[in-house]
Amino acid sequence: MSILKQRRLSAELITAATSEPLTLDQAKAQLNIATNNNDHDLELSELIAQAREQWEGDTDTVCCTSTWRVRSEYMEDGLKLPKRPIQSIESIKYYDGSSTLRTLTTDIYNFDAPKREIRRQFLKVFPVSLYRWDAWETIYVCGYSKDGSLVPAIAKRAMLLLVGYYFEQRGDADSQHDLKAYEKLVARFMRGDYP
């Protein structure tokens, strides 16, 4: 196995999502707060974002459509991209031997979405690039949907558990609240065959 495939690549957020996978009403229902009670709306909005960030970090997923970038020294057949589900590859660019940034043509590669891998087309070769840490740049779009409507129910349930935990335990640094239900949902999601 190559060095590249063993190394875990980091994804940089380029364009953030414009919505959250949970609504204020869903968070209020989780906490038994009346929907017309707006006393906690700002706090709940922040907790929804925190719960989403926790879930996404624990599962390497992206809930709502956003754009990401991965930079690497090399390009190899089978380069696995972090984050899922990946909707599309926007571009793959590389610095050629004269340090000119070029776009890799789509007839050279294809994308294996279930495996999240960039694959060389049959009988094609990746061009030679300049030796530098950011010689290759892949821009791609991730997320279940723009508005979060297609986020799996298991993910929404887990995030609601976190919202409840964060709301109930605010200010209690010594809390020993049990997050086993959340952890089980993370484990089930990671075992499941989710895109």
Image: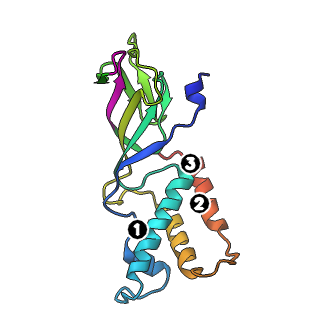
Tag nearer the camera, 1 or 3: 1
Disc nearer the start of the sequence (2/3):
2
Dividing the picture into quadrants, the one containing residue 45 is bottom left
Q: Is residue 49 toward the left or the right of residue 169 in the image?
A: left
- State how far apart marks 2 and 1 are (Cα): 17 Å
Image point (50%, 70%), residue name:
160
Question: SS at mark 2?
Answer: helix
- Mark 1, Cα crowd under 10 Å, few <14 / some 14-19 / many 20+, is many
- Mark 2, Cα crowd under 10 Å, few <14 / some 14-19 / many 20+, is some
Q: Which residue in the structure is indicated by mark 3?
A: 192
Quadrant containing the N terminus in the rendered view: top right
Give above or below for 169 relative to 122. below
Q: In the image, which residues are magenta? A: 89-99
Q: Which residue in the structure is indicated by mark 2?
A: 185
- Indicate yes or no whether the magenta region holds residue 104: no
Question: Which numbered disc covers residue 22?
Answer: 1
The three-letter code of the residue at mark 2 reads Leu
- Mark 3, Cα crowd under 10 Å, few <14 / some 14-19 / many 20+, is few
Whole-percent x, y for residue 78 in the image: 49, 25
The three-letter code of the residue at mark 3 reads Gly
Give above or below for 62 relative to 114. below
- State how far apart marks 2 and 3 are (Cα): 10 Å
Disc nearer the start of the sequence (2/1):
1
Whole-percent x, y for residue 75 in the image: 45, 23
